[in-house]
Amino acid sequence: MALMRCFTSPGGLGALALLAAACSGDSKDETVSAPTQTPEIVVQRPRLNYCPPGVGDEICDFAAAAEGRVQQSDAASLVGAGGPLDNATGRDALSAAIAAALPVSEAHPRTLRSITCPMVRVPPPEPNCTAKFGLVFATISEKEIDAGPIGILVLVFERAASGPRLTTHGIPEGPGRLYVIFGPRTTGGEVPGSDINGPGLGHGVYPVEVLAPGEEPYAPGAAEIIDGVEVRPLRIGGDTTLPDDVVVYLGPAPWAADSFAVLLWREYRGPDGAIRRDDLFGNAIAQHGPLGITAWAADEKFNDITLTACQEGACRGIGVGGWAGEFNVFRSIDGGITWTAAGRVPAMAFPKAVTGDGVIFGQYLARDVNERPVYRFFLHPSGREVTPPAPNTEPRSVPGLGVVWEPTYLGRSIGIEPSYDSAGNQLAGLFAWKLQARIAARFENGGIFASWTYTPDRPSDPHPAMNYIGRVEPSGHPSAIYSNETTLNWIGPFALGHRYLIGNAEVKPKPDSQIPFDVPAVLIDLATGFVSPLRELNAGLPPQLQPFVRGAVPGRVARISNSTTCLNVREQATTTSASLGCYRDGVLLFERGETTTVSGVTWVAVTPPGGKPGWASAEFLERRAD
């Protein structure tokens, strides 16, 4: 028997009796098995590939049916009984809008592309379709978004007891055209030409599609298997404390802001067990005067740090995040304690990665047709041009791996794009199906920690927008993968050995919170699957600033103190041994787990910034007791 595709009326969503009535009569899709038998009518109800969370089955059923009505220009069924457009004028205007915005074409049919929901202030803000929702129809794809002024139409409905009622319709313009097709799914944005926008918050967009007859919708909830490994969900645990043997680097900033002060703090446990905080950029300002810091980059150990600053006489601001003239460059090779002037670079050139040959800068030039930033890369101080291994990639320092060239992310790309090592070789074998990898660290045995983002191959891919963390063995196959909770998004993470990672996680704020965002630093335990907030790193921060983790280096440290001028780190545990360097107070030395006493002097085995392993006198070190 041939399957019929019929559509419900606005006032009877999901009612089988009305479906059967609508499909009876003159339908040519109905087949009678025998003249003497009662015809068996099989109704294939239009369905979506998935029903977005929070939208609800009623709206999803209505949205699936609405595609057919738009294809048929059925204005009477779309406006809804008793709605503001349920009159001759309203129906005629809707018919004209459909004809004008969605011209009939066999190659480009009228297709449902997304459901939009207004954002509401339920900290954090989230989409809510309880009172109103929008349906986006198009005859063009996201790749044809600039082909002309037509091809997209937004219909906005309010929910009533009698069913959805059309309140307005409009044709988006400019950036809104791509946004209403693609998303993002759960952050606010305007819908040009409609009144769906929330009170200053905009809406969320859920790309969807109507299934062909016989197709089964996506069924969430089953355990996910990736490369033979079952994905385990991470869970928010109780508050915890920073491990003893780690130095974490923070860049406090607002969670949602166009611009903010650039900070870099170094935090670790001092000899008394309390958290010690060092303001590294404060050191630069104390030594060189006021600095309008624009960007910075560091090597994987945070020994070699370069920053750029917009200073009076060389540079001027021309808007939010925009500058003209030249940036002054400052460099520290002792972990941010002493800073030296290191020349200038053109304004809008930002340090991206520190290498043995110099610092790779990316000079912002423009945005391409897909709104990705276009950079010119060069080494500082030589000025030598650096050619990326592939378009739309930029460099980043990765512990244990050096410089990696990764895709420039916009959060709305379709399809996986590879990463490359410093030699331009594609990092193959580090990617699971549809997962875009971002490497956190590589270990001595070749295994890695990585974070992944699920990358759809089309906007309406029903797989939820998920983040993952996992461990990949030297063979290239994952041995452990963890997924986030629906409310959990993280920044980072950074590896602390083979079990722990540190980063940030967005969690629901407490009901009495002063701000709608809570993004604490967190310790991620891959053995237990718990994500535990490190609330002690919020100490001294105003509520609007979050303690964003910018990097972490595992290992026990000793801090140079009371050295008068500087402390020599020597090749051997003796005052007559050659010096590997003389380091000022405040510099951190990583301990190697050994002490010895020679001629009454206690020596500690250490590794200084950028130096070879050596020995330092314990007399001038602040260190934890053994």
Image (cartoon, grey):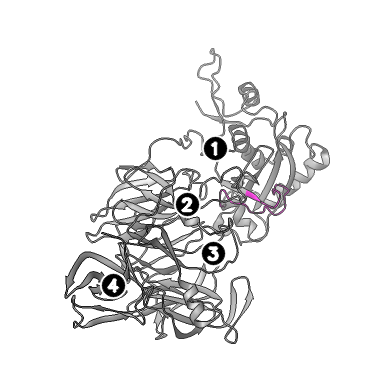
Q: CA distance from mark 3 to mark 2?
A: 39 Å
Q: Residue furthest top?
A: 36
- Horizontal and vertical percent for residue 121? 65, 46
Report the front residue among 483 and 99: 483
Q: CA distance from mark 4 to mark 3?
A: 59 Å
Q: In the rendered image, which residue does mark 2 sit on?
A: 535
Residue 197 shown in magenta: yes
Front disc: 4 or 2:
4
Residue 571 shown in magenta: no
Q: Which residues are magenta?
A: 184-203
Left or right: residue 86 versus residue 495 is right
Q: Are marks 4 and 3 in contact (CB under 8 Å)?
A: no
Quadrant of residue 494 within the rendered picture: bottom left
- Horizontal and vertical percent for residue 617? 26, 74
Location of residue 92 with respect to 319 vertically, above or below: above
- Horizontal and vertical percent for residue 407? 43, 64
Q: In the rendered image, which residue does mark 1 sit on?
A: 51
Q: In the rendered image, which residue does mark 4 sit on?
A: 619
Looking at the picture, which amino acid does disc 1 mark?
Answer: Cys
Location of residue 265 with respect to 167 vertically, above or below: below
- Is residue 249 visible in the rendered structure shown here? yes
* Residue occupying image coordinates x 49% and y 85%: 344
Q: Local crowd at mark 3 within 10 Å, few (<14), some, or many (≥20)?
A: few
Q: Are marks 3 and 1 in contact (CB under 8 Å)?
A: no
